[in-house]
Amino acid sequence: MNIKFSKALIVAGAMLMPVYSYAADTTTDTPVEYMDDATITTKVKASFAEDALVKGRNISVRTDKGVVDLTGAVNSANESDRATALATKVKAVKAVHNNLKVNPK
């Protein structure tokens, strides 16, 4: 009886292996793309930290396949434009989506 049970487990495991493999990684990002996006995000944030106009602003940076999304709030249209310009200058940035809200004065 133990041999039959063992064989059943082996067969069940073999049948479920393709399902597990598919579920394990359904993303289209390769490790290189992920690292590039993480590096881009870090460089954009660093450029913000070094800039007097946008330093200290609550700007969230997210990068996906080289496209940078900026969200958060700034005090002026100049700050918003400056954030976009700084992000655009970072190597490997393909596009910048500026979703920053300008706080009313």
Image (cartoon, rainbow, N blue to C red):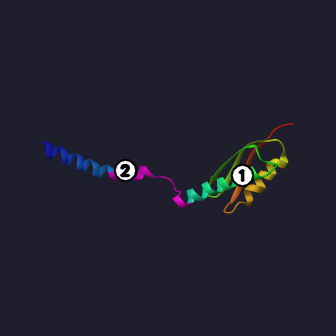
Q: Could you say which quadrant of the image residue 73 lies in?
A: top right
In this picture, which residue range is highlighted in magenta? 17-32
- Dot label at residue 19: 2
- Which residue is outermost to the left? 1
Q: Is residue 8 left or right of residue 33?
A: left
The picture places residue 43, in percent across and down from the top left corner, at 68, 56
Q: Could you say which quadrant of the image residue 1 lies in?
A: top left
Along the line of sight, the residue nearer the viewer: 64 or 89? 89
Residue bearing mark 1? 97
Along the line of sight, the residue nearer the viewer: 92 or 97? 92
What's under tag 1, amino acid-wise? His
Q: Earlier in the sequence, mark 1 or mark 2?
A: 2
The picture places residue 35, in percent across and down from the top left corner, at 57, 57
Is residue 42 among what the camera can see?
yes
Residue at 66% across / 62% down in the picture? 92
Gap between marks 1 and 2 measured at Cα: 37 Å
Q: Quadrant of the C terminus?
A: top right
